[in-house]
């Protein structure tokens, strides 16, 4: 099958729609990484097996599909039903028999598999009624979880390639104008207006142009792009094809992190299908557009998320960035004009073209239009993937969608923007999430990782963690980044070992400034953000580490002494989890912790049901440090 | 498995045949070699250098710059401890400490019997299940030191975890 023109594509869409309408029921089994890890495949296999045994027709009567990530990873494996909209959570193979008997055959609910709202204690059976979903607006993620990611028909039924069809009827300049009107800004974190990037590439001189999709989602704590590439690959590719038509280019690349094998598999399948039907290759839909996309796998280097380093890597070289004054829109891949956009930016393109730039402006704020996908993770109840209109407050995100902090603990900070971002404290929770407001507070919205921290998180340790990360990932090309981060880490090591002084804190601040000013690329330039923002908002914690030799969160091991208090109910749970057998005790006697054996790992604190294991200061510096 | 120069050469030739003779193919080819041998044998790198006409120094440059590649043989079981922010905040370090204790090897090392390689990775993008430990292809969600012990020693191995109701 090959679509030689738009008419043939539309005819096929009609047919696919008709086929779909015949299907009475569809079961969607979430195949996101989270659900797969909790055994979604086993659930799918069991479903297929039992349905086959019972002779249920799996073509028309009931289709089973494994989809992309539903986002509600905390409650996985997720199984949902079309058209009824019922959602089951934490489904195990052993539940399959009951699901078939009750829900499939008799339209009844399996009550124990329904989500229970912890706030209202009410059971919620409909997908859209669950608070986690209710407050979301899904544009970039609209297809994910709703279709089989590698089925072109599924994508066409959900209006796939309508954007491309419309785009091919427009002039390239009109497409860019439409994007301009939408106000779309780069979703990778920089927030650069997409239309302006495209225009500048169009203007640049060069024998040919390239378009690249950045799927090197390196920020730890972020997995939006992963879910999109795995769960809706056609959408990404459609966005790239429209881009290619708009800027006039024949060759595109999608750069995927090596840690994302499923994304590579699904993208590869999707590219093969598009080549087969003529949506990639020569003379796409008879429009005269020639365009093909290749996958370039990363090699596991954080710096390759930076545009110039990424292009080096695509060319098979070491991913070292270059100075920013050379714009990649003019001299990018192989020194030719190149447009590089993030995965999430590309999935917004088809729907903007289809529905118009004005439609897009109804979401978000004046300067940050549209929605943004976030990975809401850390010590929050509903961890997962969410998409919300820009301008939502952090409070709404964390407490309404995220359901608040785990175990009813105290919120301490939220970290946004990955290693380039900062930590935002409690008093700023009403900040609006968009490209500009968070930047003003020394953080940034970034690509969308949002890590929630509670009282058991040490802010000194968080800053040290990011420094250590960046020190390891610094490519070593420029001195301020390579050496500056090393020295900063050394200062932090002193503080967490109990040898820090208040002068060290001043040193950290001025060294951080130097690294910021002197580094070549964004990795070094933004590296001090976690340092400076934690010092700004949590200076008291630093001072406690230095002056009182105390880590109140009980994270910095040399500054942590764990003590079991008399509230102990002698349940024995801590004895079980202690890796060094440092805790002893019997029934009805308060357990005892042997300080000599204790490595302050904190496993016991996490498991204690009555919070009777407290973190206390270590009196003498260095004594416990090993 | 002993690797002879001839066997490596012919396998590398097969791998290279799938790609254009161009430096841009280098990283893809190294990935393929890595999945074939679990590491990058020196003979393989030399052959790739010849086939692509890329200086051997540059091949080594790429092979050592990217963390995904290893120049030394890796264990049958590769355990990757995620060090992403979400995993860090939820106590992922405890798992690393415990694994180092049980296996007696440090991060980035391989046990002498080539059974285990312990790696620390930046973020596997499975943050909602933090802390995560990946054992070859299997993701262990909400991993605890106790799970680590069970994973290695196999005591009471029961994969049916996570469901709390």
Image (tube, helix red, strand yellow):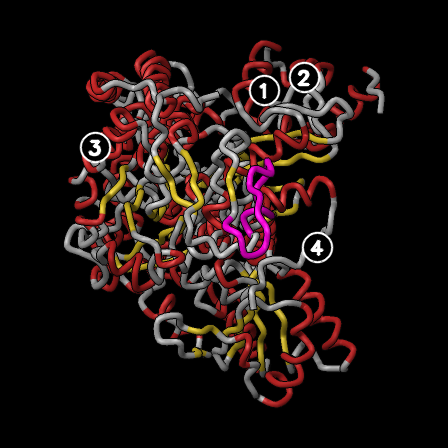
Are the residues at dot 2 and dot 1 in contact (C-beta closer than 8 Å)? Answer: yes
- In front: label 2 or label 1: 1
Residues at marks 2 and 1, CA–CA distance in whole angstroms: 9 Å
Residue indicated by mark 2: B45
Using the image, name the chain to which the residue with label 4 belongs: B
Return the disc, 4 or 2, that comes first in the chain's sequence: 2
Residue indicated by mark 1: B63
In the image, residue A622 above or below residue A560: above
**Residue depicted at 26% across the width and 46% down the height:** A185
Residue indicated by mark 3: A539
- Residue B12 numbered tag: none
Residues at marks 3 and 4, CA–CA distance in whole angstroms: 45 Å
Using the image, name the chain to which the residue with label 3 belongs: A
Task: Please state if A590 lies on the left or on the right of A500 as rendered.
Answer: right
In the image, residue B51 above or below residue A251: above
Residues at marks 3 and 1, CA–CA distance in whole angstroms: 42 Å
Q: Are marks 4 and 2 on the same chain?
A: yes
Q: Quadrant of residue A182?
A: bottom left
Nearer to us in this view, B8 or A404: A404
Residues at marks 4 and 2, CA–CA distance in whole angstroms: 41 Å
Residue indicated by mark 4: B158
């Amino acid at each position: 099958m090959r679509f030689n023109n738009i008419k043939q594509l539309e005819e096929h869409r009609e047919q696919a729609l008709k086929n779909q309408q015949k299907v009475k029921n569809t079961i969607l089994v979430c195949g996101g990484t989270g659900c797969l890890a909790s055994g979604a495949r086993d659930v799918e296999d069991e479903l297929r097996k039992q349905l086959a045994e019972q002779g249920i027709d799996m073509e028309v009567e009931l289709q089973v599909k494994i989809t992309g990530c539903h986002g509600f990873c905390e409650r996985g494996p997720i199984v949902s039903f079309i058209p009824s909209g019922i959602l089951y959570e934490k489904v195990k193979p052993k539940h399959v028999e009951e699901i078939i008997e009750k829900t499939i055959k008799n339209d009844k609910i399996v009550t124990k598999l329904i989500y229970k709202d912890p706030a209202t204690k009410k059971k919620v059976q409909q997908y859209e009624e669950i608070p986690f979903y209710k407050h979301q607006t899904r544009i970039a993620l609209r297809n994910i979880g709703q279709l089989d990611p590698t089925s072109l028909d599924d994508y066409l039924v959900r209006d796939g390639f309508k954007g491309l069809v419309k785009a091919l009827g427009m002039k390239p300049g009109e497409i860019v104008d439409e994007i301009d009107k939408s106000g779309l800004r780069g979703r990778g974190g920089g927030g650069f207006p997409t239309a302006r990037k495209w225009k500048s590439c169009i203007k640049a001189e060069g024998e040919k142009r390239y378009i690249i999709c950045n799927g090197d989602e390196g920020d730890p704590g972020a997995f939006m792009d992963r879910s999109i590439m795995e769960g809706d690959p056609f959408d990404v590719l459609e966005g790239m094809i429209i881009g290619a038509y708009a800027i006039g280019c024949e060759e595109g690349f999608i750069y995927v992190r090596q840690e994302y094998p499923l994304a590579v598999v699904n993208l590869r399948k999707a590219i093969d299908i598009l080549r087969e039907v003529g949506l990639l290759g020569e003379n796409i839909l008879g429009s005269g557009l020639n365009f093909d996309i290749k996958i370039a796998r990363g090699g596991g280097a954080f710096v390759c998320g930076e545009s110039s380093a990424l292009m080096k890597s695509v060319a098979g070289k070491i991913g070292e960035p270059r100075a920013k004054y050379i714009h990649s829109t003019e001299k990018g891949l192989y020194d030719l004009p190149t447009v590089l956009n993030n995965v999430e930016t590309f999935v917004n393109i088809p729907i903007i073209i289809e529905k118009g730039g004005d439609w897009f402006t109804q979401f978000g704020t004046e300067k940050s239009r549209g929605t943004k996908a976030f990975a809401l993770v850390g010590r929050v109840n509903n961890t997962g993937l969410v998409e919300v209109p820009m301008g939502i407050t952090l409070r709404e995100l964390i407490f309404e969608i995220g359901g608040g902090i785990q175990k009813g603990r105290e919120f301490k900070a939220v970290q946004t923007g990955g290693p380039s971002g900062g930590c935002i404290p409690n008093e700023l929770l009403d900040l609006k999430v968009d490209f500009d407001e968070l930047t003003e507070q020394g953080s940034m919205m970034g690509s969308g990782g949002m890590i929630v921290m509670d009282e058991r998180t040490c802010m000194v340790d968080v800053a040290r963690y990011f420094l250590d990360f960046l020190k390891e990932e610094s490519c070593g090309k420029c001195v301020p980044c390579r050496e500056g981060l090393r020295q900063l880490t050394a200062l932090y090591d002193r503080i967490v070992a109990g040898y820090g002084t208040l002068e060290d804190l001043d040193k950290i601040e001025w060294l951080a400034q130097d690294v910021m000013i002197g580094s070549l690329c964004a990795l070094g330039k933004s590296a001090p953000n976690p340092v400076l923002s934690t010092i700004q908002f949590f200076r008291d914690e630093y001072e406690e580490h230095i002056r009182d030799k105390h880590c109140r969160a009980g994270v910095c091991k040399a500054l942590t002494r764990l003590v079991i208090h008399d509230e102990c109910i002698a349940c024995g749970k801590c004895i079980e989890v202690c890796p060094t057998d440092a805790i002893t005790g019997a029934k009805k006697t308060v357990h005892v912790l042997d300080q000599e054996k204790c490595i302050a790992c904190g496993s016991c604190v996490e498991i204690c049901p009555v919070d009777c294991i407290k973190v206390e200061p270590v009196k003498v510096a260095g004594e416990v440090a090993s | 498995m002993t690797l002879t120069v001839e066997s490596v050469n012919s396998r590398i030739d097969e791998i290279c045949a799938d790609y254009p003779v161009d430096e841009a193919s280098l990283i893809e080819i190294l990935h393929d070699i890595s999945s074939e041998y679990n590491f990058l044998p020196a003979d393989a790198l030399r052959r790739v250098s010849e086939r692509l006409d890329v200086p051997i120094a540059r091949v080594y440059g790429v092979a050592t710059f990217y963390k995904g590649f290893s120049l030394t043989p890796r264990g049958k079981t590769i355990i990757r401890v995620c060090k992403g922010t979400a995993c860090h905040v939820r106590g992922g370090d405890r798992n690393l400490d415990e694994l180092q204790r049980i296996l007696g090897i440090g991060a980035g090392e391989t046990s002498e019997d080539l059974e285990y390689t312990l790696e620390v990775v930046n973020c596997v993008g499975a943050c909602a299940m933090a802390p995560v430990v990946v054992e070859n292809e299997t993701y262990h969600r909400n991993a605890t030191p106790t799970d680590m012990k069970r994973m290695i020693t196999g005591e009471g191995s029961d994969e049916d975890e996570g469901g709390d109701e």
